[in-house]
Amino acid sequence: MKNILLIFLTFFSFTAVFAQDEDALSFSELDKSPLDVVMYRDANQTAVARVIYSRPSKRDREIFGKLVPYDELWRTGANEATEIAFYRDVIINDQLIKAGSYSIYTIPGRDQWSFILNTATTQSGTEHDPKKDILTCPMETIPSPQEIESFSISFLEQNNGAILFLGWDETIASLEFKIAGS
């Protein structure tokens, strides 16, 4: 108990010193694109897929067509490459994708996006090796009903699989996948 109290006091002393220095960075400024994780579990609560990604914010910037140019490869987030792990074999665009970890890249277009699955997983998001792409397929896009401030990824369970959603600013892109053998 004494050690916990000492750690608590040390942390708050450090925080108080930081707060007194007007030039010091606040914790919220350390990473403008914080890391996030989203999981998809089937009806039995068994893990099927997990995405680890960084969430850049709009911050009054024009996103698609400007910050993220149309028809050019995008790391699909910020910082490190966005990583998706499939814990079961899945089928995307009629192609079998074996369970494993992959990186996600996209090519945003005005009306449609391209989804790219790549076998490399430890690279910076700006380091894309097209020789390691195992899948490229179209993604549907729709206008978002409201502005999405921070880039977000989510899953929606659907008929033995799910829909992967990528949303930012005024755009939502989606891609359906099925659990193989279901």
Image (cartoon, grey):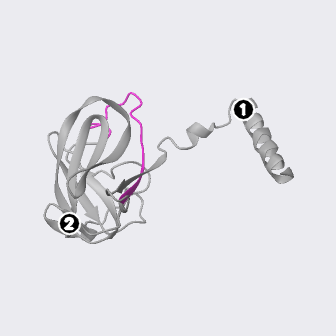
Where residue 113 sits in the image (x, y, percent)? Answer: 19, 48
- Helix, strand or loop at label 2? It is loop
Query: Which mark, residue 182?
Result: 2
Q: Is residue 162 above or below residue 28?
A: below
Circle 1/circle 2 CB separation < 8 Å = no
Check residue 57 for magenta coloring.
Answer: yes
Instruction: Specify the quadrant of the image occupied by residue 123.
Output: bottom left
Residue range (magenta): 49-67
Check residue 65 for magenta coloring.
Answer: yes
Where residue 145 sits in the image (x, y, percent)? Answer: 25, 29
**Label 1 Cα neighbours within 10 Å, binned few <14 / some 14-19 / many ≥20:** few
Give the camera-side residue of 162 and 93.
162
**Label 2 Cα neighbours within 10 Å, binned few <14 / some 14-19 / many ≥20:** few
Amino acid tagged 2: Ser
Kindly identify which residue carries mark 1: 19
Where residue 48 sits in the image (x, y, percent)? Answer: 33, 62
Q: Is residue 107 left or right of residue 16?
A: left
- Label 1 vs label 2: CA separation? 55 Å
Q: Is residue 42 left or right of residue 138?
A: right
Query: Which mark, residue 128?
Result: none
Amino acid tagged 1: Ala
Q: Is residue 63 left or right of residue 150?
A: left
The answer to whether residue 65 is seen in the rendering is no
Q: Is residue 181 above or below residue 28?
A: below
Residue at the location (37% across, 48% down)?
A: 77
Name the quadrant of the C terminus: bottom left
Mark positioned earlier in the residue sequence (1 or 2): 1
The answer to whether residue 181 is seen in the rendering is yes
Main secondary-structure element of the magenta-colored stretch: loop
Where residue 156 sits in the image (x, y, percent)? Answer: 28, 47
| Outermost residue toward the front in this view | 44
Residue at the location (25% across, 53% down)?
A: 162
